[in-house]
Amino acid sequence: MADYVPCPKCSSNKIQSVGFTWWGGIIGPKILSHVKCQDCGTTFNGKTGKSNTTGIIIYSVVVFVIAFAIFFALALAAN
């Protein structure tokens, strides 16, 4: 098990990495070191102990922009 900082909410050391999320699939949680406290359920960055909300928003926007660019490129190539 990897070493993570204690839970910022309850100070528990029972931390588990998150394997899949609706916002990042399998890759997003790995990139952001997204973990979950097994005692209180708080999710946070396992390296810093801070919220991943900003990182999640940035990740989601970047994925959307890449998907839009691919779709737009394919639409132009079809013409």
Image (cartoon, rainbow, N blue to C red):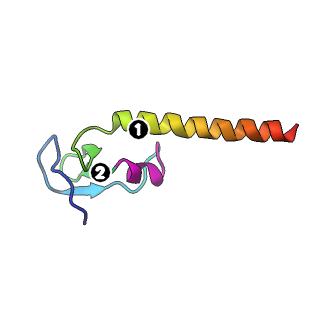
Residue 25 percent location from the top left of the image: 48, 50
- Residue 70 badge: none
Q: On the image, which quarter does residue 63 sit in?
A: top right
Residue 9 percent location from the top left of the image: 15, 40
Question: Which residue is pictured at 46% across the width and 42% down the height?
Answer: 23
Amino acid marked by disc 2: Val
Contact (Cβ within 8 Å) of mark 1 with mark 2:
no
Residue 37 percent location from the top left of the image: 22, 50
Question: Which image quadrant: the N terminus?
Answer: bottom left
* In the displayed structure image, the side of residue 16 where residue 69 appears, left or right: right
In magenta segment, residue 29: yes
Residue 36 percent location from the top left of the image: 27, 50
Taking 72 as reference, is 3 above or below it?
Answer: below
Query: How many C-alpha atoms fall within 10 Å of the one at disc 2: few (<14), some, or many (≥20)?
Result: many
Taking 11 as reference, is 15 above or below it?
Answer: below
Q: On the image, which quarter does residue 66 sit in?
A: top right
- Residue 35 badge: 2
In magenta segment, residue 30: yes
The foreground one among 18 and 38 is 18
Secondary element at image label 2 = strand
* Outermost bottom residue: 1
Which region shows up in magenta? 23-32
Residue at image mark 1: 56
Secondary element at image label 1 = helix
Question: Which residue is pictured at 63% across the width and 40% down the height?
Answer: 67
Question: Which residue is pictured at 36% across the width and 33% down the height?
Answer: 54
